[in-house]
Amino acid sequence: MVLETAQLLSTAHRVLDGDDVAESKGLYKATHKNHPSAVWVRSSCAAYAWTRQHFEALLLEYKLRYGRVHACDRLCRELNHEPQNIPQLYFDPPPQCMPDQYKSDCAVTSYRAYYGGEKRSFAKWSRGNCPSWFNPKQPNP
C-alpha cells in the first residue's frame, strides 16, 4: 500500500496542478484518476493531509517490518506539500471501496471487516505481531 498511496498523492498533484509541476517534483504519473479514492484524496486539503499522514505511517511500518527504507520514501518531501489548487474544504470520510456487505458508518471498521473477510489469504506479519483487531479464523460475513 506504500506505492499505491504515493500514487494517489502524486495523482492529486498532477490533476490539480498539471503534469509540468508534478514532473518538476519527480512525482509518479497519474493513475486511476477517477477511482473514488483518487477523487477523495484531491477533494480537500483535509483529505490530502490525512492521506499524507497515512503515507508517512506506512513508510515507518515498512521500515519496522522489513528493516529498510521503501523506494517511495524519496517522495516524502515533495508530497508533504499539498497541491496548490486543492480546495480548502473540511474533511469528509474516505470512500469505502469494497463489497456492500462490509460497509458501515465507520471506514476503519469497514476496512477491518473487509480485510478479515476477503484478504486473509495473504495476510502475514513479519517482525511484528498480528493486529489485535485481526482474527484469521473470522468467517466471512
Image (cartoon, rainbow, N blue to C red):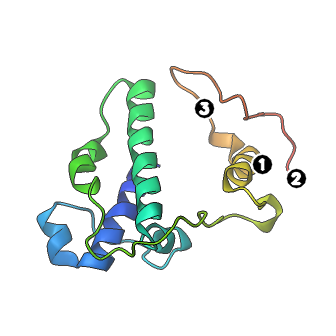
C-alpha separation, residue under disc 3 versus residue under disc 1: 15 Å
Circle 3 Cα neighbour tier, 10 Å, few/some/many (<14 / 14–19 / ≥20): few
Q: Observer-nearest residue: 92 or 136?
A: 92
Circle 1 Cα neighbour tier, 10 Å, few/some/many (<14 / 14–19 / ≥20): many
C-alpha separation, residue under disc 3 versus residue under disc 2: 21 Å
* Residue underneath mark 1: 117
Residue 89, horizontal then vertical, whole percent:
46, 72
Q: Residue at 51% of width from left, 74% of height from top?
A: 35
- Discs 1, 2 touching: Cβ within 8 Å: yes
Residue 42, horizontal then vertical, whole percent:
42, 71
* Residue underneath mark 2: 141
Q: Quadrant of residue 84?
A: bottom left
Q: Which badge, 3 or 2, is on the more N-terminal residue?
A: 3
Label at residue 124: 3
Please state which amino acid type lies under the numbered disc 2.
Pro
Q: Is residue 90 above or below residue 1?
A: below
Q: Observer-nearest residue: 96 or 52?
A: 52
Residue 139, horizontal then vertical, whole percent:
87, 43
Please state which amino acid type lies under the numbered disc 3.
Lys
The secondary element bearing badge 1 is classed as: helix
Side (left or right) of 79 relative to 110: left
Q: Is residue 12 above or below residue 81?
A: below
- Discs 3, 2 touching: Cβ within 8 Å: no
